[in-house]
Image (cartoon, rainbow, N blue to C red):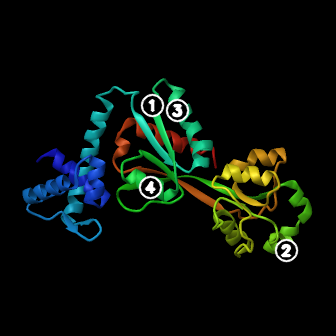
Amino acid sequence: MDLALLRTFVTVHRAGSFTRAAALLGLSQPAVTSQIRTLERQLGRPLFLRQARGVTPTTIGDELAHKAAPHLDALVEITETGLGTYSSERTLHLAGPPEFTAERVLPALMELSGDDGQGFALRASFGTADESLEGLAAGHHDLAVTTTRPRGALIGATPLCDEEHVLVAAPRWADRLGPGSLRHRGASAVADLPVVEVHESLPFVTRYWATVFDARPAASGTVIVPDLRAVLACAATGAGLAVLPRYLCAGALERGDVVALLDPAVPPLRTYFLAVRTGTLAMPHIARAHEWLLSAAAEWC
């Protein structure tokens, strides 16, 4: 049996779509369709049920994928490792949210790249969770850091770390509120304060209010800037209150540039996932980066 047909079959099985598999394989969709039909004729059994949106494997298709995929991945690993040699010319393509990627992920990867002389080239791009996962599925990225756990067989995800969210403001706002005001009065204590956020929908403030106060924020955004680092800078100048990841505002809290307005017993958390296309961890440069980031993230929580 032609291994190229099996490779195409496994890619379609993981992608759930001839179109997406074609993009991953660098083939045209008609070529992928033709290869799957050839394999089905050889086996004498249908492997996929064609649907309006994508394909669903038959029981025979699932069985074949379960048996063939590990061996194909092993062959990829052999060819990618060059029978024992490591290529430093590999480029790692990474996607993730701008702030977390810049503050956490990229410094960790720079440490890996220089730790043993077996570095790799790196290309990073920033985007939303959906954008990063779509790019990963399409083969544009090798790894994606995302706050959304992907579904389906094409992409696997491992929890990376949890970030704690903190309600902060400049010291003058904290002085105006007075000690214990939020604890005693709840969200009403800050109902009239201006809000700094990354989007008009107030995603961070809304999540914090729902978790801590069991309420929705009454105020709309006063300052909207699409970067959490800019939100911190605006909050520090007194533009208003903000909800920020602790890792991002820890230095500002220590310096007194901003003050935590509340210390809830159960602070809001958001989980980051490290996502990768199924089978690509057979490639050494992706596997090393994946393992390194999971190890580094143990110090971030």
SS category of the residue bearing label 2: helix
Q: Which residue is mark 4?
A: 133
Q: Which residue is mark 2?
A: 185
Q: CA distance from mark 3 to mark 4?
A: 24 Å
Q: Residues within 10 Å of mark 2 (few under 14, many from 20)?
A: few
Decide if residue 267 is on the left or right side of residue 282. right
Q: Residue at x 82, y 61 (%)?
A: 261
Q: CA distance from mark 1 to mark 2?
A: 54 Å
Q: Which residue is mark 3?
A: 112
Spot occupied by residue 209 in the image (x, y as percentages of width and height):
71, 70
Q: Quadrant of residue 203?
A: bottom right
Labelled pair 3, 1 in contact (Cβ < 8 Å): no
Q: Which residue is mark 1?
A: 120
Q: CA distance from mark 3 to mark 2?
A: 48 Å
The amino acid on which the numbered mark 1 sits, given as a three-letter code, is Phe
Image: 175 above or below 92? below
The amino acid on which the numbered mark 2 sits, given as a three-letter code, is Arg
Decide if residue 114 is on the left or right side of residue 204. left
